[in-house]
Image (cartoon, grey):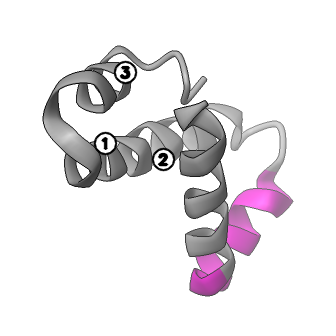
Amino acid sequence: MVAKDTHYQSAIKNRGCQNAHMENERALEQAVFAIMSDNMESFKHCIDDPQFGRCLADRVFRVTLG
């Protein structure tokens, strides 16, 4: 979901690392909300533990940069 986000892909190609990082976080948030109803426990973990949420965002960013 995140890797296919058009705004994220555009930021990777055209606007540099900082913008790509911000777009990654936005796309990740949208992806989490999309699956939230099926996996509320994971969503709750991201909210309750900001360090886990940051780690997840950083991991998704690294993975989706390819």
Pointer 3 and pointer 1: residues touching (CB < 8 Å)? no
Where, by quadrant of the figure, is residue 26 drawn? top left
The crowding category of the residue bearing disc 2, from other C-alpha atoms within 10 Å (few below 14, some 14 to 19, many at least 20), is some
First in sequence: mark 2 or mark 3?
3
Range of residues picked out in magenta: 40-51
Residues 24 and 39: in front is: 24
First in sequence: mark 3 or mark 1?
3
Which SS class for mark 3?
helix
Label 2 sits on what residue type?
Glu
Where, by quadrant of the figure, is residue 54 drawn? bottom right
Does residue 49 show up magenta in the picture?
yes
Label 3 sits on what residue type?
Gln
Q: What is the spatial separation of the Cα atoms under label 2 and label 3, in whole angstroms?
A: 16 Å
- Callout in the foreground (2, 3): 3
What is the quadrant of the N terminus in the image? top right
Circle 3 residue: 9
Circle 1 residue: 20
Q: Is residue 26 above or below residue 45?
A: above
Where, by quadrant of the figure, is residue 7 drawn? top left
Residue placed furthest toward the left: 15
Which SS class for mark 2?
helix
Q: Residue at x 31, y 41 (%)?
A: 23
First in sequence: mark 2 or mark 1?
1
- Callout in the foreground (2, 1): 1
Q: Is residue 1 above or below residue 27?
A: above
Q: Residue at x 66, y 57 (%)?
A: 59
Q: Give the main secondary structure of the magenta stretch.
A: helix
- Determine which of the numbered discs, if any, sits on residue 29 in the image: 2
Q: Residue at x 75, y 73 (%)?
A: 45
